[in-house]
Each structure stands twice: as structure tokens, then as C-alpha cells.
Image (cartoon, helix red, strand yellow):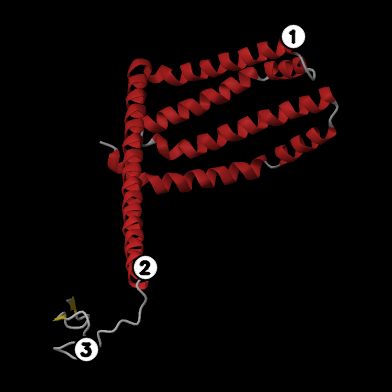
Amino acid sequence: MFSCPKCGTLNDNDALFCTKCGASLKSDTSPLEQPAKSFAQDMNQMGKNLGESVTHAAQRIQTETQDMGKRFEQRVDHASKYMENWYNRNFGIFGPLLESFIFLIVLRLAIIVLEIPSVRTLDTDKIAAILLVYILPLFAVTLLSNYTKYFARKSYKFRVFSPLFYAITLILLLWIITKILYEVSVRFAISDIRTAAVSLENSLPTIFIFALLIGYVILFLNMPRDHERTP
């Protein structure tokens, strides 16, 4: 006995037609064709299930990675604010001065290293001598930059003038760089460096105006948000 493929009625093994619906019971397929089709369908379904599982797993991993990145960013931001508050509480108005002295010490150590005979290559002692001449102007520029950042953070009113001070700091730094380039061009007899120094020096007014405009654009874009944070 076997079932009719159309209506499911049981029929004799030698029946050619279904006794109920009259459908042909003779199969035109080979004995191996139906199992092969079933196997193909099973594999196709397995592939779909596997694809869906991989997709869900990838989405879950992506979500967990994003959440982990946000949590890490929040922790870093919290730690940064904590360190900044600790630094301000302990050093106050002397904090920018301390930062500038640290810069001065690091630069002086670098110059000392360049002056060591065992590491002198390509006349590094000449570079050290040039940097030593401008070490105090670089210290002053660093001091101006640090105190501008300090007072801009402490006083909302001073923040209006901070782009001007930042632009002045940038111009002073670039001016010192032009002087260093002049010295290098003279001591090493490199005309291309002198040409670069002249070009940079002639561009200082344009750079100052551009830096000032960019600074005030950034200030006015952030001012409403910063004003809301101000108690």
C-alpha cells in the first residue's frame, strides 16, 4: 500500500490510478531522483539557516562592538575630565606655567642630546646651536598658548578674545620658524631653505587673517553649547 501523491488515499502497490481522485500513480522519476531532490532542498534550507545565523551573529557582534566603543570612549572622557580637574585643583593658575617649563626642559634635553659627540651626524651640533638661540622665544610662545587655553576655559568672557590670542600665538610660532630656517640656510648654505623662509614670512599676514576667521567661526559654532554648560 502507498499513498496517492495528490490526495493521500492509500492504494494497492500495483494500482495505476488512485481509487479516489483517479490521479496517475505511475512515477516518471527514477528511484534516485526523489531522494536527490529532497537532499538538495535540505541543503538549500540548511544554507539559508546558516546564512541567517551568520547575519544575526554579525549584527550582534557589531552592536556589542559599538556599545563597547561608546563605553570605552565615555570612560576615557571621564578619566580625562577627572585628571583635568585634579590638575586644576592642585596647580590652578600655575598649571600653564608648569606645562611650559616641561616643554622647555624637554626641548633643552633634546638640544643636549644633539650636542653629544657620539651622536653628531650631519652637523647636528649646528642645529642644536640654532635651537638654543630660540629656546626662550619658543618657551614664551608656549606660555602664551597655555594661558590662552586656561583663561578661555575658566572665563566665558575671555573666550571671545581667545581666537585672537591663538592667531597671535600661531603667527609668533611661524615667525620663529622662519628665523630658524634663515639660520639653517646660512649655516648649511642651502638656498632652497632660505626661499621657503622668505615665502613663509611673506605669507604671515594672510595666515593671521585666515586663522583669526577660522577661530571665530569655530567659537561662534560652539558658543551656544558652551553657554548652556556654563553654570
Q: Which mark identifies residue 118?
A: 1
Q: For marks 2 and 1, give the CA distance.
A: 80 Å
Decide which of tag 2 and tag 1 comes sooner along the chain: 2
Q: Is residue 194 above or below residue 26?
A: above
**Of the residues tagged 2 and 3, which is closer to the observer?**
3
Q: Residues within 10 Å of mark 2 (few under 14, many from 20)?
A: few
> What kind of residue is marked 1?
Ser
**Of the residues tagged 2 and 1, which is closer to the observer?**
2
Q: Position of residue 212 (x, y in %)?
A: 54, 43
Q: Position of residue 32 (x, y in %)?
A: 36, 70
- Label 2 secondary element: helix
Q: For marks 2 and 3, give the CA distance.
A: 25 Å
Q: Is residue 93 left or right of residue 199?
A: left
Q: Residues within 10 Å of mark 3 (few under 14, many from 20)?
A: some
Q: Position of residue 101 (x, y in %)?
A: 52, 15
Q: Is residue 48 left or right of residue 192?
A: left
For the C terminus, give its image quadrant: top left
Give the farthest residue toward the front. 14
Q: Is residue 214 above or below residue 90?
A: below
Q: Position of residue 147 (x, y in %)?
A: 46, 26
Decide which of tag 2 and tag 3 comes sooner along the chain: 3
Q: Is residue 183 above or below residue 61?
A: above
> What kind of residue is marked 2?
Ala
Q: Which residue is mark 3?
A: 17
**Of the residues tagged 3 and 1, which is closer to the observer?**
3
Q: Which mark identifies residue 36?
A: 2
For the N terminus, give its image quadrant: bottom left
